[in-house]
Image (cartoon, rainbow, N blue to C red):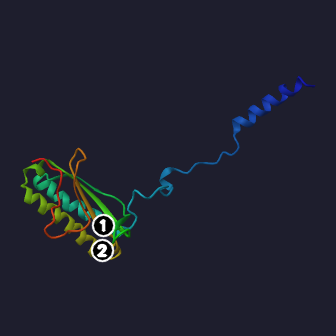
Amino acid sequence: MSRAWPVITLPLVAVLASTGCDRREVAPAGDLPPAYTRDKILDPKLAEVARALTAWAGEKVQARAVFSRVEVLSPAPTLLPYGIGTYQKQLRLPVILTTGPGWRDLAGDDREALAARAFQELSRLLDSSASAAAVQATLTIQTPQGLELCWINELEPGRKLLHGEVE
């Protein structure tokens, strides 16, 4: 009897293992909602702001190839200093502009003015959108190699915006 047990059990176990526990149909990937949405802008008004800013920067690309790439990231909470040891949490729309070949052709003052104008355009687009009004602008300009030239959360008169460039 002890020798018959493996002879009978092995084929039974093999049949059960080959059929699996549950063979349900798997839904196609297109029918499922995204699992992680932190990398997508779900608010239609913010998505429109992203498209408008990309179009605005695209005009700069076509005119002088000033920017080679525009990245509009999903809104992210940011902590900003607000007094000593106190921080204020703000929802911000981060935008990264990567400089193009035409960036080098601009004078230093023109680069500063273009950085300020890009931040003002982003802020204007956010202010004009009803649901996006609660979201503040954050603009980063970087080189194609990843060197950060500026990070703007607000414009302050007389403050230099661009840093780290080699003339």
Badge 1 marks a residue whose secondary structure is helix
Secondary structure under tag 2 reads loop
Viewer-proximal residue among 157 and 111: 157
| Residue at the outermost front position | 84
Marks 1 & 2, CB-CB < 8 Å contact = yes
State which quarter of the image contains the N terminus: top right
Sequence-first tag of 1 and 2: 1
Question: What separation in Å lies between label 1 and label 2 (alpha carbons)?
Answer: 9 Å
* Residue beneath the point at 40% across and 64% down: 42
In the image, what residue occupies the spot 79% across and 33% down?
12
Q: Dot 2 surroundings within 10 Å: few (below 14), some, or many (20 or more)? A: some
| 148, above or below 116, in the image | above
**Residue 152 falls in which quadrant of the image?**
bottom left
Circle 2: residue type: Ser
The residue that label 2 is drawn on is 129
x then y, percent, for residue 109: 8, 60
Please give the name of the residue rendered at 7% of the width and 54% of the height, measured from the top-left corner: 106
Crowd class of label 1 (few under 14; some 14 to 19; many from 20; radius 10 Å): some
82 in relation to 162, above or below = below
Which one is closest to the eye, mark 1 or mark 2?
2
